[in-house]
């Protein structure tokens, strides 16, 4: 007989692998998720504030349960680049200025 249940619940898999209850596995996954999202948010906020586009994209895409984010916040963001180093900046949006002159009718 073919098993039609192709989806494997990662929390259930964790509980079976570690030999713990499903409730404890859900609690562990919840704590890891909150931990990771907190550090990711702080690191993204700092990278955006410093206009470091490459770091922002790397932190957004790479998921390391907060390890890369903590390293960025405390080590990599504090490194001072030499002034002659080129940095990648976000493009500036140029807007047309509205003219403040009022049209006057000729008589």
Image (spheres, rainbow, N blue to C red):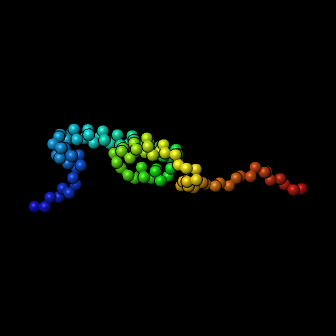
* Quadrant where the image shows the C terminus: bottom right
1 versus 70 height, above or below: below
Q: Residue 92 at x, y = what percent?
A: 60, 54
Horizontal placement of 50 versus 75: left or right?
A: right
* Quadrant where the image shows the N terminus: bottom left
The answer to whether any part of residue 50 appears in the image is yes
Horizontal placement of 90 versus 37: left or right?
A: right
Which quadrant of the view contains residue 29?
top left
Q: Residue 83 at x, y = what percent?
A: 58, 50
Q: Residue 40 at x, y = what percent?
A: 40, 44
* Residue at position x 21%, y 38% in the image: 23
* Residue at position x 39%, y 40% in the image: 38
**Residue with the most extreme right position:** 107
* Residue at position x 23%, y 46% in the image: 11
Horizontal placement of 24 versus 73: left or right?
A: left
Observer-nearest of 29 and 52: 52
Observer-nearest of 72 and 40: 72
29 versus 53 height, above or below: above
């Amino acid at each position: 007989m073919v098993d039609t249940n192709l989806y494997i619940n990662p929390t259930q898999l964790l509980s079976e692998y570690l030999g713990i209850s499903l409730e404890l596995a859900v609690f562990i996954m919840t704590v890891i998720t909150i931990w990771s999202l907190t550090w990711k948010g702080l690191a993204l906020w700092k990278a955006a504030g410093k206009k470091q586009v490459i770091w922002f994209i790397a932190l957004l895409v790479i998921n390391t349960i907060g390890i890369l984010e903590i390293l960025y916040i405390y080590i990599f963001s504090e490194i001072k680049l030499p002034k002659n180093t080129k940095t990648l900046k976000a493009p500036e949006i140029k807007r047309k200025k509205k003219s403040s002159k009022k049209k006057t009718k000729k008589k």
